[in-house]
Amino acid sequence: PQPWRHVCGFRSRSSSAVMAEEAKKLAAYAAVDNHIQNNQVVGVGSGSTIVYAVDRLGKLYCKCVCEGARQLILKHGLSLSDLDRHPELDVAIDGADEVDASLTLIKGGGGCLTQEKIVAGCAKHFIVIADYRKDSKALGQQWKKGVPVEVIPIAYVPVSRAIARRFGGEAVLRMAVSKAGPVVTDNSNFILDWKFEHAQNWKEVNTAIKMIPGVVETGLFVGMAERVYFGMEDGSVKIR
Ligand code: 5RP
């Protein structure tokens, strides 16, 4: 049997509902146990679910390539590396905002989509971890904030108009919680959240948006995820 089909004892938990936080932990622990071994070079994303993956990685000896969770990596005694030294990663693990039936993801709720897509693209295997709320038949059914698009700051208005004109909906500049100004990414760019109106051919849309001058990257991860682990409400782990 393929090793990732075996879910390390988590299925035998009580059937009582677990909260989303517990579900994140279930997914993260199962994915690390099934896909990551000692001495591997591991790409690590960011977000609240990845915290549990790093916690589990702490029992292994591996090198991590990570921008969004550097302090967390160091806190767990893991060694940090980068893409200069390790441009090829054994595996990358990350969270997602929504996952559809074809394993297309929306990512970038935390704003780190570009670096996370680069890291995932350098990995032989890209594994996603999420709680049951991210599990969706079609994008937009669960995640209502739209597709993040990272843009060069001077281009945010023309890019926003181009997206709305070509694909419908509305692409809105993401503002800081304080409303004092726009969110600025780890690459010193802005983020547009494109609230689309209907399902699309995500592969074509992703390519087309990337062709608009001023677009750096989109939060659509198409054809990248190899496996997705969902921690479920009943304490099981669903693997897609
Ligand atoms: C950050 C991301 C995160 O992976 C995504 O937002 C999921 O976060 P969380 O695990 O907190 O739900 O893409 O840009």
Image (cartoon, helix red, strand yellow):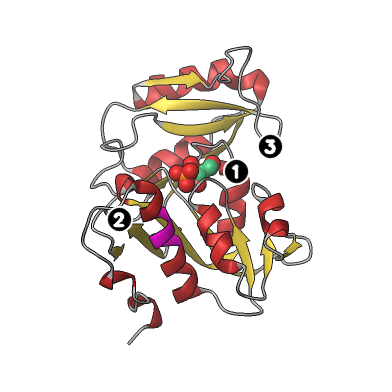
**Image location (x, y in percent) of residue 165:** 39, 19
Residue type at tag 3: Asp
Do the CB atoms of the residues marked 2 and 3 lie less than 8 Å apart?
no
Do the CB atoms of the residues marked 1 and 3 lie less than 8 Å apart?
yes
Magenta region, residue range: 24-28
Tell whether position 102 is magenta.
Answer: no
* Crowd rating for badge 2 (residues with CA inside 10 Å; few <14, some 14–19, many 20+): few
Who comes first in sequence, dot 1 or dot 2? 2
Residue of label 1: 114
Residue type at tag 1: Thr
Q: What's the CA distance linking mark 2 and mark 3?
A: 29 Å
Q: Quadrant of residue 239?
A: bottom left
Callout in the foreground (1, 3): 3
Q: Secondary structure at mark 3?
A: loop
Q: Residue furthest bottom?
A: 1
- Left or right of 218, for residue 168: left
Q: What's the CA distance linking mark 1 and mark 3?
A: 9 Å
Q: Quadrant of residue 55?
A: bottom right
Between 97 and 168, the residue placed more toward the observer is 97
Q: Secondary structure at mark 2?
A: loop
Residue of label 2: 102
Residue type at tag 2: Ser
Q: Quadrant of the N terminus?
A: bottom left
Q: Is residue 7 above or below residue 219?
A: below
Q: Quadrant of the C terminus?
A: bottom left
Q: Is residue 4 above or below residue 207?
A: below
Q: What's the CA distance linking mark 1 and mark 2?
A: 21 Å
